[in-house]
Image (cartoon, grey):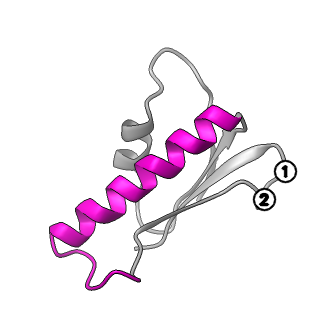
Amino acid sequence: MVKEIIIDENYSHVGLFAQMKKGDVFKVPFEKKRYNALRVEKTRQNQKARLTGELKNGMDVKFRVSATEYPGYITIFRVK
């Protein structure tokens, strides 16, 4: 499901990743600082999934972040 996220006072990077289900795609308005923060949070979430056993090896990922999929948006994919 593709969902566009609106930035308001309830927005948080961690909350975004927590509410995603397998196969979800979230579009967040692009801003360079926000893009870097989402990339860092993606790395944390994937590492957490490796430590808890959801992911089997270092090449396996649960989340991906892209700035080129939809122009003007940061795209977050939940793969597994």
Rendered residue at 17%/68% (across/down): 51
Q: Pointer 1: what residue?
A: 71
- Above or below, 10 relative to 78: above
The total of numbered circles placed on residues is: 2
What SS does tag 2 mark? loop
Residue 28 lies, in percent from the top left, at 65, 40
Magenta residues, as a range? 32-59
Quarter of the image for residue 34 reads top right
Q: Is residue 21 above or below residue 73?
A: below
Mark 1 to mark 2 CA distance (whole Å): 6 Å
Is 56 one of the magenta-colored residues? yes
Amino acid type, residue under disc 2 in the picture = Thr
Q: Position of residue 4 (x, y in %)?
A: 66, 42
Which residue occupies the extreme top position in the image? 9
Q: Which mark is residue 68?
A: 2
For the point 45% across and 48% down, which residue is it?
40
Residue at 24% over, 71% down: 50
In x, y percent, where is residue 16?
44, 42
Q: Is residue 71 above or below residue 8?
A: below
**Residue 29 shown left or right of residue 41 in the figure:** right
Identify the main secondary structure in magenta: helix
Task: Determine which of the numbered discs, if any, sits on residue 20 in the image.
Answer: none
Amino acid on which the number 1 mark rests in the picture: Pro
